[in-house]
Image: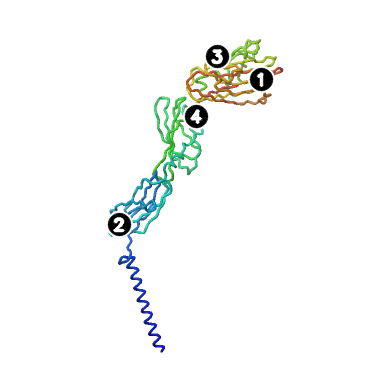
């Protein structure tokens, strides 16, 4: 009986084995089309580079001389590009641009094929694609300052940028004082970068645009549009004279005060010394340098005082800054302003101050001791000209106070800067 059982078990195992092999052969027949799966050699060292609505894909063929083409699938396999390959005995390179891609992150599938149509296993890569959204987000690199230097060059100080901002360079165009046009490209340095433009014409401008590389391996550079920027220049010596720090004038009978030399014009209200025969100037030697001044010691107030000079020629259209350094101690009910007014015939009275191109208040009628004694301060204001014209600059106002020294102020120097 035991022997019969063993024989039955053996035949059962053989039958099961035969059935299993039949099923496996049927599976292979279904999925292998009559044989084992054959793969062509895949592309090696695949790289993808970002671009403007495109990418560049590169790779290498090290093995499998039977490869005859490769295909790149994109857009979730809805699009593809096929490229024929002619293999050589060595290492061959694949290089392909895929255009008309949407901006954003894009995925790609690469497969090679042999003459029999056998495919390689897939290689997957992704890349960022840049387009209008990225372009519209770009702004020119900031300019902290652009000023004319004493040697005639213009010094541009650039705003710092992040090292990963993608700023590649700045292209600058300008014309020198000999009329020669320059166009130069300045490689970007992220922090504390300055640029010198030689022999710049006073009052001129430069234009520039900024180049951006979206990432370190991108194949396309993006540019901002050209933007014009002015070059600040101290033009005081070109359009004004006798502006400090040592003003010149003619002394009156007291040997201390007097009247400013031309081109300064002093009205009658500003002459508060020598019984109204001089005023507005104090000579060098009394202190360190000559200054524009009014002082009420001896009960000598100033009523509607005006001291001004017109520019020697019309200022070009543009923006200007007037700065002046002064020292003072003025009592209540005094009002003093430094102003710029259109034309060469003078500056307005206090009641018509609103007609000025621009002004800064030294005192406005409510300040008492507005500037602490023995302290020198600097103030400035801006004005803009839409057309070239002569401009008058000067000080105006009323100053009261008695005693020793009463109320007083001193303007020690004046600067005119073209922005």
What is the x, y in percent for residue 161? 49, 40
Tell me which corner region of the image, top left, top right, bottom left or bottom right, holds residue 12: bottom left
Q: Residues within 10 Å of mark 1 (few under 14, many from 20)?
A: many
Front label number (2 vs 3): 2
Q: Which residue carries the number 4 mark?
A: 147
In the rendered image, the residue lying farthest to the right is 403
Front label number (2 vs 4): 2
Q: Quadrant of the N terminus?
A: bottom left
Q: Which residue carries the number 2 mark?
A: 67
Q: Which residue carries the number 1 mark?
A: 334
**Front residue of this view, candidates 100 and 263:** 100
Q: Earlier in the sequence, mark 3 or mark 1?
A: 3
Q: Residues within 10 Å of mark 4 (few under 14, many from 20)?
A: many
**Front residue of this view, candidates 319 and 71:** 71
Tell me which corner region of the image, top left, top right, bottom left or bottom right, holds residue 323: top right
Circle on res. 262: 3
Task: Classify residue 233 as left or right of residue 94.
Answer: right
What is the x, y in percent for residue 21? 35, 73
Determine whether 219 is above or below 275 in the image: below
């Amino acid at each position: 009986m035991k022997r019969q059982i063993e024989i039955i078990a053996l035949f059962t195992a053989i039958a099961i084995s035969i059935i299993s092999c039949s099923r496996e052969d049927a599976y292979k027949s279904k999925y292998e089309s009559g044989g084992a799966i054959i793969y062509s050699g895949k592309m090696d060292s695949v790289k993808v580079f970002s671009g403007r609505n495109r990418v560049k894909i590169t790779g290498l063929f090290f093995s499998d001389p039977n490869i005859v083409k490769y295909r790149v699938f994109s857009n979730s396999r809805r699009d593809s590009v096929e490229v024929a390959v002619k293999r050589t005995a060595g290492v061959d390179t694949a290089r392909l641009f895929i255009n008309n891609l949407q901006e954003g992150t894009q995925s790609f599938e690469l497969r090679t094929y042999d003459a029999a149509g056998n495919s390689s296993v897939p290689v997957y890569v992704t890349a960022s694609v840049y387009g209008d959204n990225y372009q519209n987000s770009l702004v020119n690199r900031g300019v902290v300052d652009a000023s004319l230097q004493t040697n005639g060059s213009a010094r541009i100080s650039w705003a710092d940028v992040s090292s990963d901002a993608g700023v590649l360079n700045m292209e600058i165009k300008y014309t020198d004082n000999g009329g020669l046009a320059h166009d130069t490209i300045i490689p970007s340095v992220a922090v504390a970068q300055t640029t010198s433009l030689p022999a710049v014409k006073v009052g001129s401008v430069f234009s520039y645009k900024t180049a951006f590389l979206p990432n370190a391996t991108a194949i396309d550079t993006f540019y901002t549009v050209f933007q014009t920027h002015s070059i600040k220049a101290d033009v005081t010596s070109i359009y004004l004279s006798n502006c400090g720090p040592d003003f010149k004038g003619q002394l009156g009978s007291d040997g201390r005060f007097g009247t400013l030399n031309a081109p300064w014009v002093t009205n009658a209200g500003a002459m508060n010394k020598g019984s109204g025969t001089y005023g507005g100037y104090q000579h060098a030697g009394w202190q360190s340098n000559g200054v524009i001044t009014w002082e009420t010691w001896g009960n000598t107030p100033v009523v509607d005082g005006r001291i001004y000079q017109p520019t020697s020629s019309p200022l070009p259209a543009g923006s200007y800054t007037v700065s002046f350094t002064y020292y003072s101690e003025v009592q209540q009910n005094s009002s003093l302003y430094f102003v710029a007014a259109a034309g060469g015939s003078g500056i307005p009275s206090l009641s018509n101050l609103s007609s000025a191109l621009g002004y800064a208040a030294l005192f406005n009628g409510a300040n008492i001791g507005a500037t602490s004694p023995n302290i020198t301060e600097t103030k400035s204001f801006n004005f803009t000209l839409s057309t070239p014209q002569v401009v008058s600059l000067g000080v105006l106002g009323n100053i009261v106070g008695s005693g020793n020294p009463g109320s007083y102020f001193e303007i020690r120097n004046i600067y005119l800067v073209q922005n």
